[in-house]
């Protein structure tokens, strides 16, 4: 069902208020790895509005490698996130980690994110197949392109056709970067599926200085959008600070992404 053989026309998702994801427009989503506080959300939303970015990312349930790391503000944080986003005309993409959260999060999110550690959580995918909200599925940490498509097939076949695929880097033998952003996946996915394809250069390379280059490369490779981490003080971020852009870096990237998109 997610194959081009089944549907030739590219899928375009409408989040409302003129926010679309898919062919015909460049989707930009930015924000902190973790939602940390009301003050932080206010600063980030202002940065997004100033730069005409309509989607904010930010986790309230965080899948951390260590149980002692910051694990997010949970539902209280999400409710506040939702309330503030509505006030700023911003849409929300945030990670859902387990089946029990789907229903409680539903009314407060615009796009459910399935994280790389959950790409093959088939119970979660089944549950998301039953909701009427877009789902962005990240590629598994050691997942193949075919496995990512199979994960999308779970949600689609469950009845939810509002899907976005996200290349966020895979684990390889290389240790010079956090992950290896597999830009090969972009044209391959664009050919194999009618679904929108988004690139996450932050997790893909894991090094702030190199995030803009990989974001621009993602657009040139044919991505429908870029999702990246930005924070008012990246060095103080509760998670993933080393790969997070400051506001000036983010503003510059946004300008360049729009220029490069015009070249396609
Ligand atoms: C994130 O987006 O902050 C995140 C945890 O991503 P991933 O699942 O790709 O590691
Ligand atoms: Mn992160």
Image: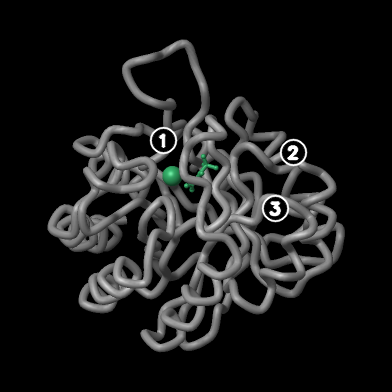
Identity of the residue furthest to the top in this view: 173
Question: Mark 3 to mark 2: distance in Å?
Answer: 22 Å
Which label's residue is closer to the chain start, 3 or 2?
Answer: 3
Q: Where does label 2 land, which residue?
A: 120
- Drawn side of residue 264 relative to residue 198, left or right: left
With respect to residue 153, does 47 lie above or below? below
SS for tag 3? loop
Q: Which residue occupies the foreground of this view, 87 or 154?
A: 87
Label 1 secondary element: helix
In the rendered image, residue 228, in percent from the top left (x then y), is placed at 36, 51
Apparent side of residue 51 relative to residue 1 in the rendered image (left or right): left
Residue to which mark 1 is pinned = 204
> Dot 3: few (<14), some (14–19), or many (≥20) neighbours within 10 Å?
some
Residue at the spot of label 3: 4
* Residue appearing at x 53%, y 58% in the figure: 60
* Circle 1 or circle 3, nearest the eye: 1
């Amino acid at each position: 069902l997610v194959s081009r053989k089944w549907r030739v026309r590219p899928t375009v998702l409408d989040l409302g208020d003129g926010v679309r994801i898919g062919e015909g427009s460049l989707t930009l989503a930015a924000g902190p790895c973790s939602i940390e506080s009301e003050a932080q959300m206010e600063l980030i939303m202002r940065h997004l509005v100033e730069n005409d970015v309509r989607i904010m990312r930010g986790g309230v349930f965080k899948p951390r490698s260590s149980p002692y790391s910051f694990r997010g503000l949970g539902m209280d944080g999400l409710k506040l996130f939702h309330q503030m986003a509505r006030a700023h005309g911003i849409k929300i993409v945030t990670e859902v980690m387990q089946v029990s959260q789907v229903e409680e999060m539903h009314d407060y999110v615009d796009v459910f994110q399935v994280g790389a550690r959950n790409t093959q959580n088939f119970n979660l995918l089944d549950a998301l197949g039953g909701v009427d909200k877009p789902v962005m599925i990240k590629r598994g940490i050691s997942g193949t392109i075919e496995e990512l498509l199979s994960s999308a097939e779970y949600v689609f076949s469950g009845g939810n056709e509002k899907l976005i695929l996200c290349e966020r880097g895979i684990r390889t033998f290389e240790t010079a970067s956090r992950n290896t952003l597999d830009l090969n996946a972009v044209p391959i996915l664009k050919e194999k599926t009618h679904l929108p394809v988004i690139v996450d250069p932050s997790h893909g390379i894991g090094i702030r200085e190199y995030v803009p280059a990989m974001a621009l490369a993602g657009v040139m490779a044919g991505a429908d959008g870029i999702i990246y981490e930005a924070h008012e003080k990246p060095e103080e971020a509760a998670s993933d600070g080393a790969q997070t852009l400051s506001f000036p870096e983010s503003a510059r990237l946004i300008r360049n992404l729009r220029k490069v998109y015009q070249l396609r």
